[in-house]
Amino acid sequence: MKQNCDVLIIGQGIAGSCLAYCLLQQGFDVQIITSHTKPNASKIAGGLMQRVSGQYLSLPKLIQDHFDEAVSFYQSLNTFFDAPIISSFPTYRILDESQLNIWKKKRTLEPYKDYLGQHLQSITVQGKTTHVGVDIYDSYSVNTALLLSLFSKYFLEKKILSYHDLTEKDLIIHDHAVQCNTIKANFAIFCIGSCLTEWSLFNDFPLINSKGDMLSLTLNQAENRILQYDKWLIPIDHNHFKFGSTYSIDPTISPTQSAYNNLLSSLSFLGYNDITIQAIHTAHRCTFSDYKPSMGFLNHSPRIGIFSGFSSKGFITAPSLAKQWSVLFPNLPNQSLLINRFTNS
Ligand SMILES: Cc1cc2nc3c(=O)[nH]c(=O)nc-3n(C[C@H](O)[C@H](O)[C@H](O)COP(=O)(O)OP(=O)(O)OC[C@H]3O[C@@H](n4cnc5c(N)ncnc54)[C@H](O)[C@@H]3O)c2cc1C
């Protein structure tokens, strides 16, 4: 591994991977240090990408601003890695009573009408259970584990990735550089997701970690669509699916029996009974109090940067923001996402 570089990326989830990849494309000398043992929300995430969001069927501006660029980023990776990173699937949303009313109000309005089906549908699951719902348009799934492993392989081949659980004592911050063990970098950018709360450098920032659980399973009957209710069923490959959601503020990282039971009963409610569970995974997603990601440098340590807080939409916002930042780096494309919006320190 080289000892000097322009940018040291700490953490290789979707944020660190996208930023490292985009900075490399702009000709920067990049090194990445990530952990084998710390949680990686990106690997277990559903990888669901759609414009319509949450129980209010809203179209958040942050998502609309970055959606197209994210889709084209992953499509370019389909070619670059010669692998099915992003796929488009028919998507159905089962509506409860309150969502039914929201849908009735929004479905004919601009811009909702482009993304919400216009007609209520009867959705039959596995030939038996029937629900009422609508089509959701412009919906994709990213194979997150495949993407992360291909990025790791690519960075390892370039000899710019190493594995280590960094702690504060590994980092020495100088006026013009950051020393991290044997690496000296002009800038160190933290892309460590929910683990930001472990670092005193970020004590001042209003961070909330929400826990989520994701089942990995195969369906023993064919299915080729994304199905959403309060949780999502997302096709990965060859009848292999993910099913889960993020929902609780809970600092523990292990999956619980009650979360497992809850996912199984939701699958059963939807009509999926003939299934084989491979695993349950749990992770935290990192959210700032205003639900927007943060990028930029600390006022009190201008060699230390952050690219984090992607909450439940990291697969939509991280690629586009990474690309925009890499073009202007170290300057920022977007002052509204400055980490210093929370503090004057
Ligand atoms: C159950 C669940 C489902 C989700 N589904 C979706 C979805 O369908 N669509 C979507 O867009 N988003 C989804 N999300 C949100 C998405 O996962 C996050 O927005 C995104 O993964 C955050 O990426 P990140 O790179 O910031 O953090 P992470 O992916 O957590 O990556 C952080 C990296 O930093 C490393 N690290 C941490 N501490 C250290 C250290 N001290 N030293 C070295 N390395 C360290 C970790 O090992 C890890 O590799 C989901 C989240 C969860 C939990």
Image (tube, helix red, strand yellow):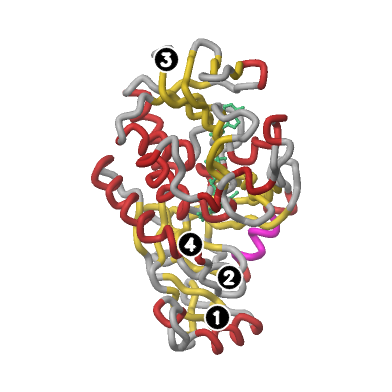
Question: Do we see residue 284 in this rendering?
Answer: yes
Q: Is residue 242 left or right of residue 26?
A: right
**Do the residues bearing badges 4 and 1 touch, measured as CB atoms within 8 Å?**
no
Question: Is label 4 within 8 A of ligand 1 (CB to nearest ligand atom)?
Answer: no
- Tell me the SS state at disc 2: loop
Q: Nearer the viewer, mark 2 or mark 3?
A: 3
Query: Image height check: is 41 above or below 95?
Result: above
- Tell me the SS state at disc 1: strand
Q: Nearer the viewer, mark 2 or mark 1?
A: 2
Secondary structure that dominates the magenta span = helix
Q: Is residue 25 left or right of residue 277?
A: left
Q: Residue 200 lies in magenta, yes or no?
A: no
Q: Residue at x 29, y 45 (%)?
A: 83
Residue 103, image x and y in percent? 55, 84
- Tell me the SS state at disc 4: helix
Q: Is residue 75 left or right of residue 300?
A: left
Q: Nearer the viewer, mark 4 or mark 3?
A: 3
- Label for residue 4? 3
- Report ligand 1 position as a quadrant: top right
**Do the residues bearing badges 4 and 3 touch, measured as CB atoms within 8 Å?**
no
Say which residue label 2 marks. 229
Q: Residue at x 62, y 67 (%)?
A: 230
Residue type of the residue flagged with mark 1: His
Give the mark, 2 or 3, whose residue is nearer the N terminus: 3
Residue type of the residue flagged with mark 4: Ile
Say which residue label 4 marks. 63
Q: Considering the image in quadrants, where does the C terminus appear?
A: top right
